[in-house]
Image: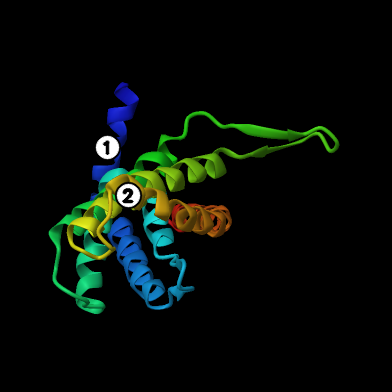
Amino acid sequence: MKSFFSMFLKSAKEFRHVKCITVTGIFIAISMLIEMFSIDLQFVKINFAFLAIAVIGMLFGPVVSMFAGFACDIVGFFVHPSGGFLPAYVLVAGLQGFIYGLVLYHKNDKHSILFTNNETNKSYDITLCLRAIIARLMDIVIINLLLNTKLNLHYGFIPEQAYGAAIVSRIAKNMIELCVDLPMLFVILPIALNAYKRIGSSRKVTT
């Protein structure tokens, strides 16, 4: 329990580092850029902007990623203004960032989950992949299905209907998105983590 709460302190301390501010700012900008190229297939909208928040959460933890979520939604409103500014969605975006930071923060990894191939006898660390699955599922269930459905009904963005029926009608859409999102997380997260670690190690060598 102590280590769990220490994660939030570690994450908050990340704000002390210029590298954290710089990298977070870059990924917020990337999120805005990705948002511009979302794919609308009528029955489902493919949008990979969450990947930037996931990377921020993995690198800097729940406190930083929560504020990054706030920033993404606020900046996104000014970059792509559509309708009125709704603070409730800002809070939801912050919660989304918090979820990714809570589940993915790499500095909180003390135990690895290994998959061993019996034919080659090689072991592979699948911890990050499992964390990515959990984080994305939590995002879909808590943010997309529960909170966003409630807010969309409240503000009239979807046809008026019973809350439960609205959730059911959105399940298929979100499952299709999940099938596309998870492979992207499996590719992007390890690349971003390894690149970040290499930058840190190269700076230690030069100093």
**Vertical position of residue 6 compared to residue 59: above or below:** above
Amino acid, disc 2: Ile
Total marks placed: 2
Circle 1 is placed at which residue position? Answer: 8
Q: Determine the image quadrant of residue 101.
A: top left
Kind of element beneath mark 1: helix
Q: Earlier in the sequence, mark 1 or mark 2?
A: 1
Q: Which residue is mark 2?
A: 143
Callout 2 secondary element: helix
Give how far across and how far down residue 43 sits, in percent.
Answer: 46, 68
Q: Residue furthest right?
A: 119
Residue 138 shown left or right of residue 18 in the figure:
right
Q: Nearer the viewer, residue 152 or 94?
A: 152
Which percent across, then down, holds residue 94? 24, 52
Residue at position x 32%, y 66% in the image: 28
Which quadrant: the C terminus? bottom left
Mark 1 packing: few (<14 Cα in 10 Å), some, or many (20+)? many
Give the residue type that dot 1 points to.
Answer: Phe
Say the numbered circle drawn on residue 148: none
Q: Quick one: 22 or 78, which is closer to the camera? A: 78
**Counting other residues with Cα less than 10 Å from the Cα at mark 2, is it few (<14), some (14-19), or many (20 or more)?**
some
Please state the horizontal and vertical placement of residue 16, each as a whole percent of the image. 23, 50
